[in-house]
Every structure is written in structure tokens, then in C-alpha cells.
Image: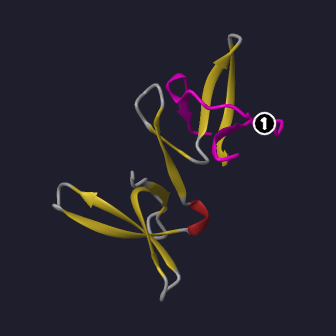
Amino acid sequence: MKIRKYKGICEESFSEICGYLIFEENESLYYIDKYIPEMGCNIKYCVIPETISQSTGEFDKNNNEVFENDDVKFYMSGKPHICKIIYKYGMHCLLHKDGYVNHYPIEFKNMEIVKL
């Protein structure tokens, strides 16, 4: 079994944090545990629950890890398209701007993560 990474926005710094998700039930808080090589240890960052997304386990054409809710750009029939990665139908899908959701597996290596 592969353990997936998560990312979310830190409540304190409002920066994006990537690591492993921890839920503290007694505090009702979500943390992302991230290894900091310079310190040689892990640090827990409290993250905003609505910003948490799970890794797809795949990488884009620039070798960036792709997460749910990432916006990706790809070319279809020579034209650029930007879609959001979602999880539906038991797989990761593309949510198009017009609301259409694909029903076929995605080839992540032909896509590029974009920041809108």
C-alpha cells in the first residue's frame, strides 16, 4: 500500500504545505507533517481543512506532483485547455470549465500544473 501525501494552506503563514495528514480528534484540527531536512526532523503545521487535497500519486510533464483540485493545462486538437483534477467514478478525472467530467483515465505526463 502506498501512503499518499496531502497539501493544504497553513493557518499561520497562509503558505502551501505538503506532507502527511494528521487529524487530532480531541482538538478537531488537521495538521500536515512535513520533514525539514535542514533541521533533521518533522514539523506539524496546522492547515485550513477546506484547503486540504490528496496527491494523485502522479506527476505532470515538469515532474511536479499532481494533487486533487490542481488546475492543469493540456492540449487537445492543438488547442490549450485548463481543467481541474477531481476524484469521481473511482478515479481521477478532469473537470472542464463547462462542467463536463471525463470518464476515461488521465495521462498526467502530457499535462502541466498551472496557478490561476
Classify residue 39 by image quadrant: bottom left
Neighbour class for label 1 at 10 Å: few (<14), some, many (≥20)? Answer: few
Which residue position holds label 1? 97
Residue pictured at 57% horizontal, 39% vertical: 115
Residue pictured at 46% horizontal, 25% vertical: 61
Q: Position of residue 53 (x, y in %)?
A: 55, 55
Quarter that holds the C terminus: top right
Residue farthest right in this picture: 98
Residue pictured at 43% horizontal, 53% vertical: 4
Residue 25 falls left or right of residue 50:
left
Q: Look at the picture and state if 36 lies above or below 28.
A: above
7 or 58, which lies in front? Answer: 58
Q: Look at the picture and state if 111 lies above or below 32.
A: above
Q: Is mark 1 on a helix, strand or loop?
A: loop
Q: Which colour scheme is used?
A: secondary structure
Q: Where is residue 46 in the image (x, y as percent from the top left)?
A: 44, 72
Residue farthest front in this picture: 1
Task: Give the magenta part as a residue range.
Answer: 88-116
Residue 88 falls left or right of residue 55:
right
Is residue 71 on the magenta stretch? no
Q: Which amino acid does label 1 sit on?
A: Lys
Classify residue 45 by image quadrant: bottom left
Q: Look at the picture and state if 96 lies above or below 34.
A: above
Q: Position of residue 101 (x, y in %)?
A: 76, 38
